[in-house]
Amino acid sequence: MEEHYVRILKERLDTENYNKLMAIRNSYLHKFIAKYIDLCNPDSVFVSDGSERDQRYIREAAIKNGEEIPLAIEGHTVHFDGYYDQARDRENTKILVPKGVYLGENIRTMDREEGLREIHEIMKDIMKGHECYICFYTLGPENSVFTIPCLQITDSSYVAHSENILYRQGYKEFIRRGETSDFFKFVHSEGELDERKTSKNIEKRRIYIDLEGDTVYSANTQYGGNTIGLKKLAMRLAINHAAKEGWLTEHMLIMGIHGPNGRVTYFTGAFPSMCGKTSTAMLEGETIVGDDIAYIRSIDGIAKAVNVEKGVFGIIKGINKKDDPIQWKVLHSPNEIIFSNVLVDEKGKVYWSGMGEDIPDRGYNHSGEWWRGKRDKEGKEIPPSHPNARFTVSLEAFENLDPRWDDPKGVEIGAIVYGGRDSDTWVPVQEAFDWDHGIVAKGASLESERTAAVLGKEGVREFNPMSNLDFLSIPIGRYIEINLEFGKKLRRKPKIFAVNYFIRDKETGEYLTDKVDKKVWYKWMELRVHDDIEAIWSPTGYIPKYEDLKSLFDKVLSKDYPESLYIKQFTIRIPENLSKIKRIRNIYSKIKNTPKELFKILDEEEKRLKEVREKLGDYVSPRDLEKLVQKP
Ligand code: SPV
Ligand code: MN
């Protein structure tokens, strides 16, 4: 007799789609798909084999069903998320844990059985009236030690379309692997839609991560960070695997920094959302491998990284012709691009805040019809575009794409950079003394003022170790320990740096650096990776010498670099650094299983700061540090 799941598939899929699915010889996969088709009850099912034809089908479906609207430039469309569905929903994103498992206070969890029961209830018949898309992808390049195959089930053509742009197709990888349960699974439904084609039942928005089943469920939401399975949802599953298998899943860009004589040094960089990660990855003159998520493994003692993705889900706010020429060009060329939550005029032209062009007084945006001065229910003025408005485009559209972006072996990491939105403490760029110091005093101590990328109040200073806190599925203490251990495996350790693009003048409150100055910081770091130049010892790490920066500013930006500015930027602010250590120590003292090493490194840093303060006062000029013959 035919098995139950086969019967469901035969009943629900037409012959063509059934055959496409059955070409993958994997009964575990078939059972899983049958279960969710039966539960979610879509009107029809489309199986994508990743071919150009199937990708076109999904693209066209998004336009036909109104989730995307075509724009003036060929290939461009716009998608709107609901007014209250514009960012990652931390509150309703939970890791499902079996009884007795505790991940710590900073990680939202829920009893596994209860969570599974709730989400399955919410998902019952949730796809009624919708078409369901079954898609296959890989995280990381195909056929590599980094590869993780993924199954996405979604009733949102926008989500499926986004994933086709952002991820490598995996249908062939699934066929190659045959019978296996070793892959990630994402079940998503946007739920009932309103007349604007946005999720209606926001109060039932849930994102539940089942580590045990390697499955993520997402319901009643459309915003990419909540729905695009392979992005932040997969990260939680991958962090859990990485921890067990001794590699790292990081919220990091990967880029090639071009040094003297054609030398390319690969950097990875972790920044909380909206803190300059994409604009760093897009620096003119450098090359991009990825802008958001990296898998890092030690291969023969060398740290190698791959980009998990193949596209960009980038923040559009502030992108302008002068500072972001590469992105500007892509956004104005006939590429396949989905804009989300921007302002559109009647001619199908898009506008966003901070684009450096006149924005019309009327149009259509995430609030529906929009006019300047329009207010929302809470009385808040609605800006032309949402601060978390985004664009989705393949990396292949970018002229600065690194030739090794898809290398199945990964690229060797020369440096790791950590940076947050920090108005008063860290200098613009500094180098950690060694791996452990970098992991603890830079990565694990990362703080950032909150932005619009998550729902909630902006501007609050938040602890965000490695900019990965939102995605951790293992206890923080364990995560820090794994990072420390990872360094021990390496025979060539990347250097670790910290940057701060947001430092302000103590008196005037003005930003002390320009958006483009980061070009110089990266060239400086590249030279340091190869020990081509010296640096100045400071209690928090090595900082640049004025003469080196002056020459780089001239060479890279043809810009004068006054010594007075250098001194303002690189003065070590001892009281602020001491308060920071206090805050960080306090947080970790409440976190179970924090490695002892962490406290030791923080104590040492505190001691160095206090000793320097004894000699040179609260605010220490780099010129004075330079004169220190004997380091404390
Ligand atoms: C981020 O917020 O870090 C992003 C976008 O990269 S999201 O998909 O929302 O995570
Ligand atoms: Mn991100």
Image: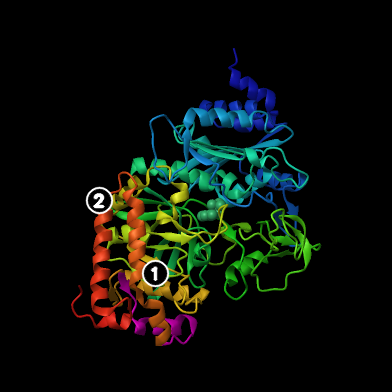
Which residue is most to the left? 630
Q: Considering the image in quadrants, where does the N terminus appear?
A: top right
SS class, disc 1: loop
Q: Alpha-carbon neighbours of circle 2 within 10 Å: few (<14), some, or many (≥20)?
A: few
Q: Is residue 228 magenta?
A: no
SS class, disc 2: helix
Residue 550 location, quadrant:
bottom left
Does any portion of residue 164 appear in the rendered image? yes
Q: CA distance from mark 1 to mark 2?
A: 24 Å
Locate residue 541, reporting x and y percent. Answer: 30, 69
Report the front residue among 443 and 624. Answer: 624
Which residue is most to the top? 1
User: In the image, is the residue at mark 1 within 8 Å of ligand 1 by its beta carbon?
Assistant: no
Report the front residue among 271 and 179. Answer: 271
Locate residue 573, reporting x and y percent. Answer: 36, 73
Q: Amino acid at mark 1?
A: Trp
Q: Which residue is mark 1?
A: 426
Q: Is residue 619 left or right of residue 55?
A: left
Number of marks drawn: 2
Residue 629 location, quadrant:
bottom left
Q: Earlier in the sequence, mark 1 or mark 2?
A: 1
Does any portion of residue 298 appear in the rendered image? no
Q: Give the numbered dot on residue 596.
A: 2
Range of magenta residues: 541-562
Q: Residue at x 52, y 40 (%)?
A: 150
Report the front residue among 415 and 143. Answer: 415
Q: Is residue 558 magenta?
A: yes
